[in-house]
Image (cartoon, rainbow, N blue to C red):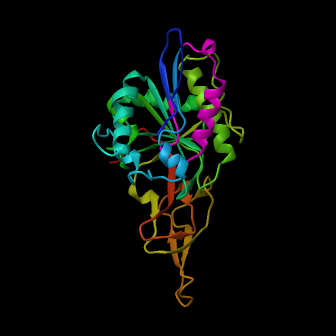
C-alpha cells in the first residue's frame, strides 16, 4: 500500500507537517494539501514542509472513516504498534519517524459522513499557558472563521494527543462534512495552510485572515462542558432546526426525532442546553441511540472550567 509523502526542503528553518485523509471520507484537507504539494517550489521555502494528503490511503480509496484492511479508526490507536495491525503500524510510523522532525502539525479533518461542521480550526485546551498561546496564535494565523478550544474527547489515542506529548504545536481543522466537498472548507483550508507557512516564516508573506462576513480574523470559541452536546435518546429520523453556524439559545428546539415507521408515535423534541453557535450538526437523517446531533460552541474564556 503506497502512501504519498511529499517533502519540500530548502535552507534553514522549521518543519511544518500537513496531514489529510486520516479519515478517508474527509475531503477538504486531501484537496488542499495535494494542491499545495503540486505548487510549492523549493526556492520558495526556508525550512521543510512535509505533506501527507492521504495518510490513511486504504480508507481514502474506500471513502470510509475506518480502514477497510483492519476495521480500525487510526485516529484512535496512536501511538500505535510496530507489530500490530495495518493501522497500528501506520500510527507507529507517524509517531516514531515523522513527528520527531516536526515543529508544528496541522491535521486537517471534517465531520465526514456522520455530521456537518462549520469551518474552523480546533485545539485541545493545554494547561501549559505558553504552548496554549503558541497554538492559539497559529490558529489566528490559519485564519478560519472560528478556532474551537475543547477538552475531554478522545484525548489519549488521537494523533493530536501524540503531537502534544512531543511538545509540538498541534492544530486541527473541521472544514465541513455531510459526505460532500465543502466549497468554503476547501477555500479556507488552502488559504490556511499557506498562512501557516507564512506564520512560521517558511515562506515569505503575511497571513491573510479577513473573513467573508467582513470580520478581521478568527474568533476563539470553546467546547468545555458535557451540556453542549445533544444526543439522540433512541433511533429514528432526525430533523434539525438549525444549520451549523447559526446562533442558538438554551431552551430552543434543536430538532425533532421522528418515527415514520410508527405514525402514531409523536416526535421527540430535543432542546439546546446552552447559548452559543452551532458548531456541529446532524449529518444523515437516520440516527441511532446515542448519536451526536449537535455541538454548541461559546466564546472562549481563558478562565477554563472544563474537566
Residue displayed at 36% across by 33% down? 93
Tell me: residue 281, above or below residue 301: below
In the displayed structure image, the side of residue 72 where residue 185 appears, left or right: right
Q: Assess whether residue 24 is covered by the magenta stretch.
A: yes
Counting labels gives: 0
Tell me: residue 150, above or below residue 294: above
**What is the x, y in percent for residue 257?**
53, 75
Q: Nearer the viewer, residue 34 or 18?
A: 34
Residue 84 appears in the picture as rendered? yes
Q: Nearer the viewer, residue 2 or 204?
A: 2
Q: Residue furthest front?
A: 1
In the displayed structure image, the side of residue 203 where residue 290 appears, left or right: left
Q: Residue furthest bottom?
A: 264
In the displayed structure image, the side of residue 296 where residue 85 appears, left or right: left
Residue displayed at 44% across by 50% down? 67
**What is the x, y in percent for residue 158?**
38, 43
Tell me: residue 244, above or below residue 125: below
Q: Assess whether residue 57 is covered by the magenta stretch.
A: no
Residue 151 appears in the picture as rendered? no
Residue displayed at 31% across by 40% down? 80
Q: Residue furthest top?
A: 11
- The stretch of residues the image draws in magenta is 18-46
**What is the x, y in percent for residue 171?**
47, 35
Q: Quadrant of residue 196?
A: top right
**What is the x, y in percent for residue 27?**
59, 45
Residue displayed at 65% across by 48% down? 182
Amino acid at each position: 500500500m503506497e502512501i504519498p509523502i511529499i517533502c519540500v526542503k530548502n535552507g534553514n528553518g522549521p518543519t511544518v507537517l500537513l496531514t489529510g485523509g486520516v479519515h478517508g471520507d474527509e475531503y477538504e484537507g486531501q484537496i488542499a494539501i495535494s494542491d499545495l504539494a503540486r505548487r510549492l517550489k523549493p526556492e520558495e521555502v526556508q525550512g521543510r514542509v512535509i505533506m501527507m494528503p492521504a495518510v490513511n490511503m486504504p480508507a481514502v480509496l474506500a471513502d470510509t472513516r475506518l480502514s477497510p484492511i483492519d476495521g480500525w479508526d487510526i485516529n484512535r490507536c496512536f501511538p500505535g504498534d510496530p507489530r500490530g495491525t495495518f493501522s497500528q503500524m501506520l500510527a507507529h510510523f507517524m509517531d516514531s519517524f515523522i513527528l520527531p522532525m516536526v515543529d508544528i502539525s496541522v491535521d486537517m479533518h471534517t465531520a465526514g459522513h456522520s455530521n456537518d461542521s462549520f469551518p474552523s480550526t480546533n485545539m485541545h485546551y493545554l494547561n501549559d499557558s505558553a504552548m496554549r498561546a503558541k497554538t492559539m496564535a497559529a490558529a489566528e494565523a490559519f485564519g478560519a472563521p472560528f478556532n474551537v478550544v475543547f477538552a475531554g474527547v478522545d484525548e489519549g489515542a488521537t494523533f493530536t494527543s501524540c503531537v502534544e506529548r512531543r511538545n509540538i504545536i498541534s492544530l486541527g481543522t473541521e472544514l465541513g462534512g455531510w459526505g460532500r466537498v465543502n466549497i468554503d472548507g476547501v477555500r479556507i483550508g488552502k488559504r490556511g495552510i499557506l498562512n501557516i507557512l507564512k506564520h512560521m516564516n517558511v515562506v515569505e508573506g503575511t497571513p491573510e485572515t479577513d473573513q467573508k462576513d467582513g470580520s478581521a480574523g478568527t474568533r476563539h470559541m470553546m467546547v468545555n462542558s458535557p451540556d453542549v452536546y445533544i444526543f439522540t435518546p433512541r433511533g429514528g429520523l432526525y430533523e434539525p432546526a438549525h444549520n451549523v453556524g447559526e446562533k442558538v439559545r438554551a431552551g430552543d428546539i434543536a430538532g425533532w426525532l421522528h418515527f415514520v415507521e410508527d405514525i402514531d408515535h409523536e416526535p421527540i423534541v430535543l432542546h439546546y442546553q446552552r447559548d452559543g453557535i452551532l458548531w456541529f450538526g446532524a449529518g444523515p437523517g437516520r440516527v441511532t441511540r446515542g448519536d451526536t446531533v449537535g455541538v454548541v460552541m461559546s466564546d472562549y474564556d481563558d478562565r477554563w472550567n472544563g474537566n
